[in-house]
Amino acid sequence: MSRNNGRYIPIARPSIEDDEIDAVIRVLKSGMLAHGEEVELFEKEFAEYIGVKHAAAVANGTVALDTALKALGIKEGDEIITTPFSFIATANAILYQKARPVFADIDLKTFNLDPDKVIEKITPRTKAIIVVHLFGQPADMKAFKEIAEDHRLFLIEDAAQAHGSEFLGKKVGSFGNVAIFSFYPTKNMTTGEGGMVVTDDNNIARKAKLIRNHGQERKYYHVELGYNYRMTNIAAAIGRAQLRKLDKLNEIRHSNARKLTEGIKKIKGIIPPYEDPRAKHVYHQYVIRVTEEASISRDDLAKRLNERGIMTAIHYPIPIHKQPLYAKLGLDKFECPNAETATKSVLSLPVHPALSSEDINYIINSLREILS
């Protein structure tokens, strides 16, 4: 790994301080390490933050998706419309139910599902839409709620990258029948590994909590097939500390993003992230597009930045429906030209709260020098 004069700017860095360390020590000293009261407190506080009635903490974001779909009763043969431009877990959760993912194209400006393209994919077998709030940018939830209501479909929010994001003044995760969050270390808040299922529906919440704990209604009394998807008290303690500072960390991300955009918006061949004026973007990732007008390719730009000690990432290099797994299943025939354009042109730059003003200026100046 090359560095420039010892400078190294990672693409992500969790914001772990004494609050999180003290919380973990407190739980370790209590001797109650597994799922317990700390988890219940985290669920209560997170539900209040999102503005919903119920939250069920689980082991990670992927099992949160699986739990949400199982709680909705999604089954073999059902069709679920979702995006081809996301982490693969979004679509894999559909396969876990033996249901069929149906891929609709994205809006190239926001990177989120295009509501008009979703309408084109609805059939009598369609049961749900999974909307992803990608990179911290809220999807058009007004449009998606109307589509779901008009066609009597479940609306599922994959908010794994959008903690604290808002649309029309309302937190994402509070629009659909059910929503999920991830607390992986690169996310805007973390528990190490962890996830959350949130809903206003009493029945969905009850089922989610049964599914995550062996279908157990009370001790050794199992009413349906369940799994060990539980979160630990240790993880929940970290999550509670992180939740208290989430808004502050998001403000720093947004400030960093604003400075980056101001610095690079006039560089030829670079398209900075778009912000929907109806929404609050929380910049899980700061994703630019490198167009044909740039003096070098996206991949060469990433290499040159890496040589200067600026770590980048490509989120995501292959659309889900073109992944080998999905090609083997015959699901690679969907036409999603915007998603394919995105995979060839996107590049994520550091935007996390640990960046200094000097780091941000260095990123901007490096882009200017490389692309001049």
Image (cartoon, rainbow, N blue to C red):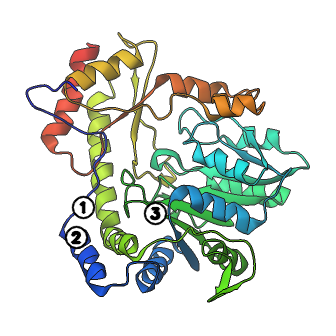
The part of the image, by quadrant, that contains residue 8 is top left
Please give the residue where the numbered disc 1 appears in the rendered image.
16
Query: Disc 3 residue type?
Result: Gly
Whether residue 91 appears in this view of the structure is yes
Query: Disc 2 residue type?
Result: Ile
Please give the residue where the numbered disc 3 appears in the rendered image.
194
Whole-angstrom CA distance, mark 2 to mark 1, is: 8 Å
Image point (22%, 31%), residue name: 363
Q: Position of residue 276 (x, y in %)?
A: 50, 46
Label ID, residue 184: none
The tag earlier along the polypeptide, 3 or 1, is 1
Image point (72%, 79%), residue name: 203
The tag earlier along the polypeptide, 2 or 3, is 2
Label 2: state its secondary structure: helix
Position of 106 with respect to 51 (left or right) is right
Spot the residue most to the front: 220
Image point (70%, 52%), residue name: 96
**Front position in the image: 16 or 271:** 16
Whole-angstrom CA distance, mark 2 to mark 3, is: 17 Å
Location of the C terminus by quadrant is top left
**Front position in the image: 144 or 157:** 157
Whole-angstrom CA distance, mark 3 to mark 1, is: 16 Å
Tell whether label 1 touches label 2 (CB within 8 Å): yes
Whether residue 172 appears in this view of the structure is no
Q: Label 3 crowding class (10 Å Cα cut-off): few <14, some 14-19, many 20+?
A: many
The tag earlier along the polypeptide, 2 or 1, is 1
**Front position in the image: 53 or 64:** 64
